[in-house]
Amino acid sequence: MEAVCRGTAEKGGHSIGILRGTDPLEANRWVETVIVTGMGTSRNRIIALSGIVVAAIGGKYGTLSEIAYALQAGKPVCALGKWAGIDGVVPVISPEEALDFIIENSGGDSC
C-alpha cells in the first residue's frame, strides 16, 4: 500500500488510508488523509464498498474478503495474480492493464 500511496502522491493524486487501528501514526508516510476505525479487519467492508472499482494485487485473506464484499455489492473487480481465478473477477496481467480496467469501469471519472 505504501508504493500505491507514493505513486499517487508523485502523480499529484490523493490517497486515503482507512486503518484497522486507532493510531493515525500507523499510516504510511504517503497517506494524505488518514481515517482510523478501531475496527480491525471489519474495516475491509468499508474499503470494498467505498470505491467504484476494486483492483486486487497480492494480499492475503483480508484482500480476499474485500473482493467478496465488492462482488456482493456488484462492483467491478480485477485482479493481478493469485485472485484472478475467482468467479466474477477479471484477470489482468500488468499494473497498466489494471489501470485501464479501473478507468473503463469508473464511468470515466478521474481516479
Image (tube, rainbow, N blue to C red):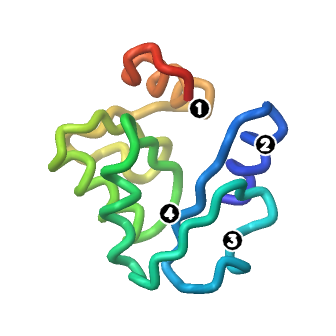
Mark pair 1, 3: CA separation: 26 Å
**Residue 94: which disc?**
1
Mark pair 4, 3: CA separation: 17 Å
How crowded is the residue under tag 2: few (<14 C-alpha within 10 Å), some, or many (20+)? Answer: some
Three-letter code, disc 4: Gly
Instruction: Residue 49: give x, y in percent of width and height.
Output: 31, 51
Q: Which residue is mark 3?
A: 27
Three-letter code, disc 3: Ala
Three-letter code, disc 1: Ser
How crowded is the residue under tag 4: few (<14 C-alpha within 10 Å), some, or many (20+)? Answer: few
Above or below for 86 versus 88: below
**CB-based contact (under 8 Å), mark 2 and mark 3:** no
| Foreground label between 2 and 4 | 2
Picture quarter with the N terminus = bottom right
**Residue 59: which disc?**
4
Q: Which residue is mark 2?
A: 9
Above or below for 107 versus 14: above
